[in-house]
Image (cartoon, coloured by chain):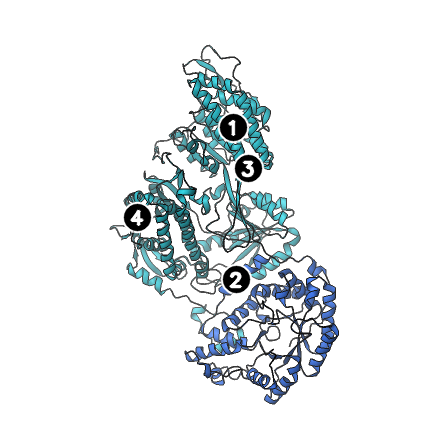
Amino acid sequence: MSARNWGTELDLSWISKIQVNQPAVLRRAEQIQTRRTVKKEWQAAWLLKAVTFIDLTTLSGDDTSSNVQRLCYKAKYPIREDLLKALNMHDKGITTAAVCVYPARVSDAVKALKTAGCTIPVASVATGFPAGQTHLKTRLEEIRLAVEDGATEIDVVINRTLVLTGQWEALYDEIRQFRKACGEAHLKTILATGELASLTNVYKASMIAMMAGSDFIKTSTGKETVNATFPVAIVMLRAIRDFFWKTGNKIGFKPAGGIRSAKDSLAWLSLIKEELGDEWLTPELFRIGASTLLSDIERQIYHHVTGRYAAYHDLAMC
Amino acid sequence: MAATRARPSAREIFATLEYGPVPESHACALAWLDTQDRRLGHYVSGKWLKPEHRNSVPCQDPITGESLASCLQAQAEDVVAAVEVAGKAFENWSGLPGASRAQHLIRLAKMIQKHQRLLWTLESLVTGRAVREIRDKDVPLAQQLLQYHAVQACTQEEVLAGWEPMGVVGLILSPTFSFLEMMWRICPALAVGCTVVVLVPPASPTPLLLAQLAGELGSFPGILNVISGPASLGPVLASQPRVQKVAFCGAVEGGLRLLIQESVWDETMRRLQERMARLRAGRGLDGAVDMGARGAAAHDLAQRYVREARSEGAQVFQAGDVPSDSPFFPPTLVSDLLPASPCSQAEVPWPVVAASRFRTAKEALAMANRTPRGGSASVWSERLGQALELGYGLQVGTVWINAHGLRNSEVPTGGCKESGSSWHGGLDGLYEYLRPSGTPGRLAYFSESMNYDTFGLAVPSTLPAGPEIGPSPTAPYGLFIGGRFQAPGARSSRPIQDSQGKLHSYVAEGGAKDIRGAVEAAHQATPGWVSQSPGARASLLWALASALERRESALASRLERHGVEFKAAKVEVELSVRQLRAWGARAQAQGHVLQVAELKGPVLRLREPLGVLAIVCPDEWPLLAFVSLLAAALAHGNSVVLVPSGACPIPALEVCQDMATLLPAGLVNVVTGDRDHLTRCLALHQDIQALWYFGSAQGSQFVEWASAGNLKPVWVNRGCPRAWDQEAKGAGPELGLRAARTKALWLPMGD
């Protein structure tokens, strides 16, 4: 991952005057999905690139060490070897960017990846995921334990109450403490934008999270009713750009939840390319949180290589 | 260039993550051209016409220069034949019940839906515009237009009772137009029962395709006829006696002028440049480009402008992923142009944006309004109060608040000043092709021999005309300007005879200087009157009505003197009083809110005053016509300069005596004198926003010709008298339509 974001002092003037023009954002979001498409070789290359951005995720109540192990194996071998060979991409070491699990499954994942002999980072959700409605003390403890178990990336959820009641200083302080609890681990802050009521709040929460030292800002937990949407993403990306212009720090972006099709992933890539530029198209600055997306990408690659649509049994499950 | 480079492998693209070509197959467009053997004629009466011995013009791909087809050029006789066909079709089509016309339009909408790929690839292929724009915006809107107007046709008998279709409509398209502009005009025309002859510039196949789609519906083949020919055929089409209305369609949207407040200038420019740098230009048929190209002429125009701007000291920023060869031109941001430089005055060409700074919103408004154009504008501000004030103040037809370029078939679009005064879409668009039932159609009066240089130039001199046996009290004398009676600049008078040919009295002989003074006075009164509430306007009109009532016997006897029977004279006064009251009441019901699909938030349809309105009143009904015209104009917030009846101006001057005490000074100005001369002065005055002329056919022709100087809206009667005592023709809705202009104010909402 890129250099850590050490954050800045809280400067409320960065957010006090902000007013997001929602209808305009909606229109831009609508346009961007139809204006950029890629076909043929471009599509295959872009899809493989998308694979390298995936935080391959399992966040279910019934996760056990066996399906976490399977997930880790899939993270290391995301696309069938023969398909990669056909594209002359087999020697590129294509893996997903990370695996993402619940805190209690971190040690399983770390072990499985070690056995498989790869260095894919393990990310853990924390801080009372997904609602964040637990005491600060236990939330901080959760981070520390996940880091102890070997997670090098921590996806924390913010306290929505603080956003909805406009307590920006308190929000800054909390995330600051998360940051500290992470130690060397990277901090990815989930804004749960589906519960923030307005795009203006999304912008403000993004800015506070970055000032407080988040290395990534992430749209949603995947458990809210509204997940990663384009309008929300545009607002967060503009906040990332503003933060970069103000401080020179590049903060990463991670949409999560509801990104299931290969086509969706291409739209997300072009959104990043259009709004932030090619520099952001690296796993250090862009991730996609997804569980089923990978199989659809593999399906599309299969089709690109063979000219046929894959049968269910042609591709490994993850 | 992409074409000469070997195709990169997935491995290479994986490293660069560049965009690749996304070619849209245009095989169907070529196949369609093949059905005509790549030789396009005209589409008239449901059939392709390919007359012999006609010149042909090549239709080229504007990007590759490849020849796609050749297009036959019509001659005058082809135009005449097409008008003939449309005229015949009109008899059937206009006689149909609205519901049947609606059915037919719906069928056409479905036809377009079935062949939409052909439509969008053909249009993109021949115009070079981005296919995405045509596919995602134009084609759906074309269908929506047909559907909306089908609904209007269906309710026409009810909603538009008292109006009838004009007849054959001639539509003349400019060399760079989009087929959508044609749809905005033909849909309302067809819906209300008109039939259309479209003259398209050389090498524009899309309108021909549309005509073919309409023709292949089987029934009513002659309602939409398309002929392709040079611009010189425009006058031929316009002068056909059967053509009752001529509509023009200007060029596609040009570049933009951007006004940015000084305090956010740097920030805005930075964001703008950042965004522009990501724009992609390329072949229109590529599915992933933001902009195509509009041919070599557009390229050269933009290049000239940018070169000129640079030499005038402007900053030029160009960016984007754009092929380096003509006809592609990069999106360009020109800034720091000095207001006095020629480039600031010139129209900004596509794809250029000229940005300049302002200090206060008031200054921005003044800058925005100081241009002869008045099509559309957008206001970006998070302060709703400020945005609305600007939206109301901008002299344009459409204002978008925090949005740009939205269009919907229900919302009238049009313009003011040199952007023209006709309307498309909504109810306003329908009235363009209707006239009050029973009023005569457009007469084909057009005098070739008319001498525009001398019409009304000289005023015959007047001499004492015998004994003045005036009634007592004597008639008021003078020009009513700025709220009081003034002596005319020429210091001479003209005699007014009564019905027996005896001298009734003298009226002042007004001239150019008096007109200038009257217009100035009217302009001074305008802001005050515009800011009055409709209620306040109504009460003044009602007060004037009461004053007229008190003056009834004097007015009636003046009319009697001019040969009006006593009873009829009394009726005329009574009707005049009623007109004032009626328009006073109507002043309060202006504009309304539209709710359109695809937009969260309202669209306000505002009715705004035209400004200074000049009216040359008819000779018939000297009091009633004067009062009706005056009342309608005032009710809508205009200030007026009137030339009263030539033969019988005294009743109007009597009314002025009351206006002197009741109305703000300068709001109404009445200038008597030689009507031709005064008409000439008014028509050639650039600072009059609209001119209504009720007089001779010759005068009408002159007014239309002269007003082209600033494209002010004119309304002329071509020498046909109106029945001013009848609601529909005299006082009815037509006056209300003409007395104000529409503005659509889009207010998207959301947080």
Looking at the picture, which amino acid does disc 3 mark? Gln
- Earlier-in-chain disc, 3 versus 4: 4
Which one is in front, B431 or B549? B549
Residue indicated by mark 2: A30
Residue holding disc 3: B588
> Which class describes the residues within 10 Å of circle 4: few (<14), some (14-19), or many (20+)?
many
For the residue carrying disc 2, how many other residues have a C-alpha within 10 Å: few (<14), some (14-19), or many (20+)? few
The answer to whether residue B513 of the structure is visible from this angle is no
Q: Which mark is residue B222?
A: 4
Asked whether the residues under the numbered discs 3 and 4 touch, taking CB atoms below 8 Å apart as contact, a structural biologist would say no
Is residue B160 toward the left or the right of residue B362 in the image? left
Q: Chain of mark 1?
A: B
- The residue located at (47%, 80%) in the rendering is A87
Of B326 and A77, the residue lying toward us: A77
Residue that mark 1 sits on = B515
Q: Are marks 4 and 1 in contact (CB under 8 Å)?
A: no
What amino acid does circle 1 point to?
A: Ile
